[in-house]
Amino acid sequence: MFLVVETVLVLAAGCGESPGGGDGDASATGGHAGAAGATDGRGKEGTAGTTGSGGAAGAGGTIGEGGVRDSSMGGSGGSAGAGTAGNGGNAGVSGAAGRSGAGGAAGTAGTNTAGQGGAAGGAGAGGRSGSAGSAGVGGASGASGASGSGGTDGGATVLAATPPMGWNSWNTFQCNMDESLIKGVADTMVSSGMKAVGYEYVNLDDCWMNGRDASGNLRWNTTKFPSGIPALADYVHGKGLKFGIYQSANTKTCVGLYGGVDGNVAVGSLNYEAADAKTFASWGVDFLKYDLCAGDRNSFVKMRDGLRATGRPIVYSINPGNGSNDLCPPSKCSLNLVSIAHMWRIGFDINASWSSVTGLIDQDAPLDSYAGPGHWNDPDMLEVGKGLSATEDRSHFAMWAILAAPLIAGNDIRSMSAATRDILTNAEVIAVDQDSLGAQGRLVATPATNLQVWSKKLSGTNVRAVALFNRTDTTAAIAAQWSAIGLPAGKASVRDLSGHTDLGTFTDSYTANAIPSHGVVLLKIASAP
């Protein structure tokens, strides 16, 4: 959020490089392969161990485990097993993990048996471009092991592999939130069916903190949170949900909150990044919203590194802008946002007005190349159920889905209407947002002023989500041409996702008639086999 005073946002664990694993140990007990680099699921790949000297024929080496996978770069190679006295040679050195956004597990080293070479490390499970495993060297009676192959894509293990879904306290409650409210929201997220369709994060925004203790550790406001933040996180986790929190890259927060008895204790994380990251991890935080708040943009990198160092998977959501005159979208920001965070704000704070919603859509439109599994453009939280018309609410939600935007509700879900609940829990629209391919939709045609055709590539062969968007003040018809949305000529099936209705099979185009003012018809169009 941005306030008149300054700016605010919600964060999560970043993606990008941190130091990789170290070199492997050259020694081997009775055999040939050295240990691979130390496991480091956060950083770039470690160097596989060098080959140890041969010994007497030994029993096959034990299998070395590969590096762990995580949301950033590939894990390091695991240790290759050392041989013991017996029949075979030692295990081959394990293959290095693939270096990728998905993070690959290094392959396991094979074992040698008498007279045969052991297979080298297998391919890294998650690495997009894993290095080949080094050949295992045979023992006295074993031949050299075969080389391991490179890693393959493992996008399913990326943190924030699809746009995060959840709820945030700011849009409705601002500083007027407490323990009882958050528990009620968690309860409702389950009972309303929101959890069942993918919402999982329950996020505190600004105003939860109350200075620091004598050791510099953050303190929560005990009046608002008498049971404590860790206990609140446990409650949320007990519902099968995840817990998020807010901080700023300044000494104070965006509302100007300072702290301490004398009011001179910094509550923001500037110069406390590593310590506060440890605190959040120890409290069970799963999502961090980190706002600039007229602070230091270098703090975003420091907090990313601090979160990674904790070893806890924390979605890192940042707002690097500082008001409407100092925005920092990925196309213009001095920071490499894709390497820092899982999601980043691209514009000024949203509000429940049509001009705010459409303005953010326009700001997000040229940024599709920056979005993908583990890193998302964030046009801000949802205003569904907060004052727009029902038609505008449906359009707002559908367009956030086409844009592959995080779906963070901002209304009071405890008292929402059935109509609002139906919009927020439309599983077919959510499936567009959460499609595993991770493509952000693009504006592909403008048949007339304020009439738009948006197309989002979905997983599968020749499948598109298409939004026919009427931004005018009157009813209109809009046609989707297969050539514009990226489908081959010929027949294709068309389904209305908002109305849960199969519309039939059409050739080369489809026209939606009588789209209401400010309305969207969201379609799934798939070429006929």
Image (tube, grey):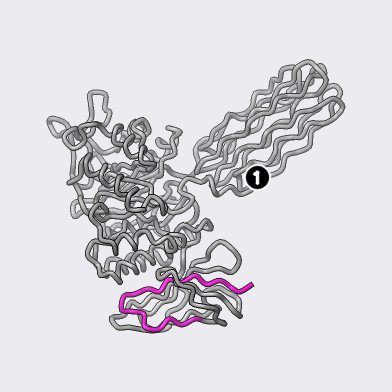
Amino acid on which the number 1 mark rests in the picture: Gly
Query: Can residue 218 be seen at all in this image of the molecule?
Result: yes
Looking at the picture, tell me which residue is in the foreground, 383 or 190: 190
Is the residue 24 above or below the residue 168 in the image? above
Q: How many marks?
A: 1
Asked if residue 112 is among those painted magenta in the image, a careful observer would answer: no
Is the residue 54 above or below the residue 314 in the image? above
Q: Which image quarter: residue 415?
A: bottom left
Is the residue 491 above or below the residue 39 in the image? below
Q: Which image quarter: residue 63?
A: top right
Residue drawn 52% across and 35% down? 19
Q: Position of residue 31 (x, y in %)?
A: 76, 21
Looking at the picture, tell me which residue is in the foreground, 396 or 441: 396
Q: Where is residue 15 in the image (x, y as percent from the top left)?
A: 47, 45
Q: Where is residue 209 in the image (x, y as percent from the top left)?
A: 22, 37
Q: Is residue 418 left or right of residue 145?
A: left
Q: Is residue 401 left or right of residue 381?
A: right
Which residues are the magenta region? 510-529
> Magenta stretch: dominant SS?
strand
Q: Position of residue 524 (x, y in %)?
A: 49, 70
Residue beneath disc 1: 151
Looking at the picture, tell me which residue is in the foreground, 285 or 304: 285
Furthest-left residue in this view: 262
Query: Can residue 1 be seen at all in this image of the molecule?
Result: no
Asked if residue 517 is among those painted magenta in the image, a careful observer would answer: yes
Residue drawn 19% across and 55% down? 4
Q: Is residue 136 left or right of residue 36?
A: right
Q: What element carries label 1?
A: loop
Residue drawn 43% across and 69% down? 500
